[in-house]
Image (cartoon, grey):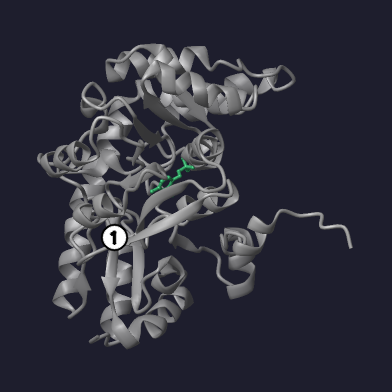
Amino acid sequence: MRRLWRPALDRLTPYEAGPSLEALRAQLGLAEVTRLSANENPLGPSPRAVEAVRAEAARAHLYPDGGGTALRLALATSLGVTADAVILGNGADELLGLIAWAALEAGDEAVIPHPAFEPYWTVVTLAGATPVASPLVDYRTDLEDMARRVTPRTKVVILCSPHNPTGTIIHAGAFRRFAERLGSDPPLLVLDEAYRDFVDDPESADGITLLAEHRTLIVLRTFSKISGLAGLRVGYAVARPETVAMLNRVRAPYNVNRLAQVAAVAALEDREHRERTRRLVIEERRFLSGELRRLGLAVVPSEANFVLVHAGAAAAALRDALLKEGILVRDGGAVGFPGHLRITVGTRETNARLVKVVERTAPSP
Ligand SMILES: Cc1ncc(COP(=O)(O)O)c(C=O)c1O
């Protein structure tokens, strides 16, 4: 028999995104389901982005600007970099794929914290390279261990801060010490900052600031979280122009659609919506974490818009009880943490409703 598919595919299982909200509502017979499993923005998109999409819709027959010029310029201005240091992606997800595609081939290695955002593993495997797992310690990225796993075969190191699914961060000092250990000929250093806007710890590493010092650094960010545009799929990477030029070689010409581009420009201008989101998430993260701890659950200190909660043997019962009430949370088992739940920070009303269900379900891990 002719072998049609690449052997690398045997090592992958398709990403399990779960049923759509519509399907879930029908399945549960509920009028409303609140999804706290995908780390979306509880306030919705910026109203300015919605208006921009409306205005742009009539031009849907025209291909988008393949260079994403207006958005890249707006990002460059707001971040204090040049436009040739920015590349757009169909979500940060696509950029992970582009990095792997551009850099990795069979025999190469990529060092990845484990568990972590699952697509890291997928894109490396798909590229035919070998993912090298560095176990988290106490829910944190172990930079000592990661550095030890870097070999001459390592082409990429992926860091995630705040980390998904734990919400823990990497401090600037620790990042610098780690990068120093990689020496003068380092691999590509991907710093995924999808949740950077929710960080409240001043010691946190900031990828954009670190770019000047680290030649191979690629910072990933997204409009899916703070800007509430997850459904439009727009993310970006910031790196040295020579790195961006390489990624552009593997990028499809029209990878970010017209509506996403105008929405992202409008969202970037809407500082008020971003600030409101940030304030809400930080305040509600504190509320939710405090209440869950009061009820006897262990909550990992989070700097993201979600919390990872250790519920032990009660996790499944808790998840089911919440679902019955129309609140969908992420089963920890699906993200590398059996006995845990990953819960997106919602509005006060949603969080209070969630806490009531937990209280009734008598968790005690
Ligand atoms: C750590 C991390 N990186 C990247 C992404 C992808 O973001 P996007 O929606 O821009 O593809 C996510 C999405 O949940 C994430 O959790």
- Characterize the local packing of mark 1: few (<14), some (14-19) or many (20 or more) Cα atoms within 10 angstroms: many
Is residue 134 something one can see in this rendering?
yes
**How many marks are shown on the rendered structure?**
1
Please tell me which residue lies in front, 344 or 193: 193
| 265 displayed left or right of 18 | left
Residue found at the far right of this picture: 1
| 171 displayed left or right of 126 | left
Q: Position of residue 210 (x, y in %)?
A: 22, 28
Placement of the C terminus among the 4 image quadrants: bottom left
Vertical side of 2 occupied by 282: above or below = above
The local secondary structure at tag 1 comes to loop
In percent of the image, x 33 and y 86: which residue is there?
A: 314
Q: Quadrant of residue 271?
A: top left
Q: Quadrant of residue 53?
A: top right
Which residue is under mark 1? 166
Vertical side of 13 occupied by 150: above or below = above
Vertical side of 77 occupied by 140: above or below = below
In percent of the image, x 40 and y 85: which residue is there?
A: 317
Q: Position of residue 137 (x, y in %)?
A: 22, 65
| 142 displayed left or right of 245 | left
Q: Position of residue 315 (x, y in %)?
A: 36, 81
Placement of the N terminus among the 4 image quadrants: bottom right
Tell me which amino acid carries mark 1: Thr
Please tell me which residue lies in front, 141 or 193: 141
Is residue 13 something one can see in this rendering?
no
Residue found at the far front of this picture: 152
In percent of the image, x 18 and y 51: which residue is there?
A: 283
In percent of the image, x 20 and y 47: which residue is there?
A: 170
